[in-house]
Image (cartoon, rainbow, N blue to C red):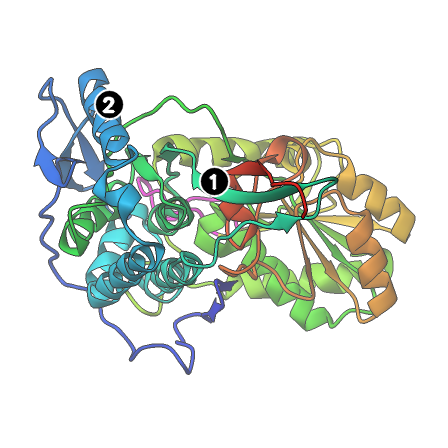
Amino acid sequence: MALNGTTIENGVSPGDAPPFPQPVKVPEIKYTQIFINNEWHSAAKGTKFQTCDPATGVKICDVDEAGEADVDRAVEAARAAGQRGSPWRRMDVSSRGRLLSKLAELLERDRVLLATMETMDTGKPFLQSFFVDLEGSIKTLRYYAGWADKIHGKTMPVDENFMCFTKHEPIGVCGAIIPWNFPLLMFTWKIAPALCCGNTVVIKPAEQTPLTALHVGALVKEVGQLIKEAAAKSNLKRVTLELGGKNPCIVFADSDLQLAVEEAQKGAFYNQGQCCTAASRVFVEDEIYDKFVRLSVESANRVVTGDPMDPRTSHGPQINQKQFDKIMDLIGSGEKEGAKLECGGFAVGDRSLFIQPTVFSDVKDHMRIAKEEIFGPVQCILRFKSQEEVIERANSTHYGLAAAVFTRDVDRALSVSAALESGTVWVNCYNALHAQAPFGGYKMSGNGRELGEYALAEYSEVKTVTIKLAEKP
């Protein structure tokens, strides 16, 4: 798995990463209230909700639930912080960058604790939380810290005696809704470019996984009294969306077969399949199809399912019972519609949320498992005969988030990449995301882009200034 430049292979840490970590045995959950204007508040109506460990079903703690009054209070605080003349708006851009760098340092300081909390709240293996989610979050903050003093406009030559230039200004209060599959990583993907451009932010973490976002609120308070955020909702004038995907992964006969098997399976099973980028439709060329299926089954059977805090574990539970039931229903539909269940397809234990990694062969395009986003550890392997055929089938979906191509032929890789209707195309790799590269989808997979320089456009307004000059002497 490669995300934001960090790779992890079943419990083996990358060579340039921090020393091999151990989770905090009994982490103290200090922050469970609503964070507004650098202060902690109880919900106005006194309501709370539980957050539970999906690996055990045990309640972790109760968290304050924001209502309408809390939302209004958070938005007003964010609006006041972002007004012209406020300390945040008057701050020079290099200082803004230093604050983001300082926040990255604090995430680094609390990295083990945050990774432990992320694993408790999501069920993902601890080493993935530590080496992928935390590493990616820290790199994202540092990347946008570097952008803070490099966002500039242009001077344009125009007709007659005019001078014309553009400048970038913050759009104001930004509302961000964070999903439960990558709570901390998505949190930083939102706040880093928004704050870099001088905006203020109102955050709503997922109710299933609020703990790391609340802890970062405490870290923000350590940074200073200028960044305002809260666990609340907001009405937005400008919307960027990263939605679902039914992502094609195309394996040609000339590819490195073992590499293709490994990467496609990481794409299918990483984070228990709970990724919008999941490789859920694997198209394999006819002449290597049977061998690809056999190697995929062997690989799936080697996946270690167990306690997410155990470094040997590479596969944890689904997030909750609702998601578990949806996945099991889709697995059942695959069997009913005639796909061949090669392995998995069952729950691990009578009452647990663990689903054994599942591989289907003989999948056809009309089947539910080939059309619907499963968001679980299910790999669907389809057969194809020609390049033209597979491109048409790969594009035959309402989604367009990500895709992958495996081939040794450079010309083919470039032509197929160009033909795929997808916001991201990986060649001979999967889930290779970096803070520097934009990420987003075509069609029903959303609009706008996160990460990279492109994300800055989502969080700034471009103003054109035209000045009439004096007549030439």
**Residue 116 drawn above or below residue 91:** below
Measure the alpha-carbon separation of dots 2 and 1. 23 Å
Viewed as shown, does residue 16 lie left or right of 208?
right
Residue 348 is a magenta residue = yes
Give the residue type that dot 1 points to. Ser
The residue indicated by pointer 2 is 71
The residue indicated by pointer 1 is 460
Choose between 458 and 110: the one closer to the eye. Answer: 458
Viewed as shown, does residue 330 lie left or right of 23?
right
Choose between 453 and 111: the one closer to the eye. Answer: 453
Q: Which residue appears farthest toward the front when viewing the image?
A: 473
* Residue stretch rendered in magenta on the structure: 344-356
Choose between 175 and 402: the one closer to the eye. Answer: 175
Residue 459 x %, y %? 46, 40
Q: Element at badge 1?
A: strand
Residue 283 x %, y %? 75, 51
